[in-house]
Image (tube, grey):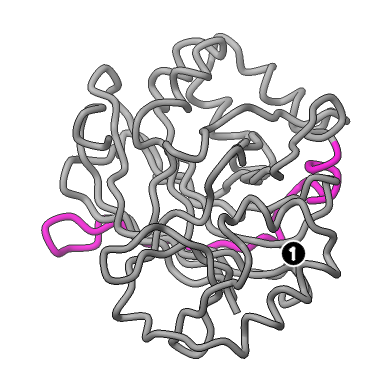
Amino acid sequence: MHLVRYRHAGGDARPGILEDGEVRPLAGVAALEELWMLSPRELATRCSAAAHSLGVPLAEVELLAPIDGRTEVWASGVTYEISREARVEESERAADIYRLVYDAERPELFFKAVSWKVQGPGGALGIREDSSVNVPEPELAIVCNAAGEIVGYSICNDCSSRSIEGENPLYLPQAKVYAGSCALGPGIRPAFEVPDPYALSIALRIVRDNTAVFDGVTSTARLHRRLEDLAGYLFRGDRFPSGAVLSTGTCLVPETPFTLEEGDEVEITIEALGTLTNSVVRGPAASA
């Protein structure tokens, strides 16, 4: 079962569940953000009730980014060893910053996107025109309710400008937050259906001119941080009445000097969560 946001027959966006190839509406729920105001038990009850409603074939609906309303996307950095080494390599003048944060008690967390800027399945990823190295970052995303409890999992593409961040760590917001820099989907798998989030394979495939230019596989078993700790720090000094999505970092990024190009297709597959596919465009207007 996946919680999804979808549009059917040109109608308005609405929340539902995807199961056995059919999408069913969530009765009495106008937006996904309403679900993140519930306790895990209440959420499970809503999902169970929707499973018995009348559905439509998946082929007849358009899946949208599974986020709406006031729900925000945040992200974590340097949570895998290889991510630490990559940041050190590209940031020689500030390498110690990344070495220190990897082992520090407090994780690196940063704002990524408001809901209306998040791309969904098939949406366009953006690459900055003022950056020479742009890469996708396939990540497990945790969905937290208003109380900070992990209630679901999704796939996030935390796109990044490595050349801008490498020039100066203070440029992180510009390297991470721009039009088309965040994609989420295809849905959200309820936490009660994922027994071990630390044993999920993550695959990244980049296709250019019908040819794979990158193929890689890793696992959340290599994650250096505990998911509950990441969520705890996010909620430690802030409130999220409509819940929050927190992308948990990556260890699967093409080595420099690889950079995305317009027309590339990026596929991220996470075990038990599905596949998120997006195309690549250049500049903010194209990814709006």
In x, y percent, where is residue 222?
70, 56
In x, y percent, where is residue 166?
47, 19
In x, y percent, where is residue 273?
56, 70
User: Which amino acid is tagged 1?
Assistant: Tyr
- Residue 175 part of the magenta-drawn span: no
Looking at the image, residue 38 lies above or below residue 250: below
Pointer 1 residue: 198
In x, y percent, where is residue 34?
67, 53
Q: Give the extent of the magenta segment.
A: 206-232
Question: As drawn, is 149 to the left or to the right of 269?
Answer: right
Q: Residue at x 84, y 24 (%)?
A: 237
Q: Residue at x 51, y 80 (%)?
A: 24
Figure quadrant of the N terminus: bottom right
Question: As drawn, is 128 to the left or to the right of 13?
Answer: left
Looking at the image, residue 218 lies above or below residue 239: below
Decide if residue 12 is in sight here.
Answer: yes
Residue placed furthest toward the left:
209
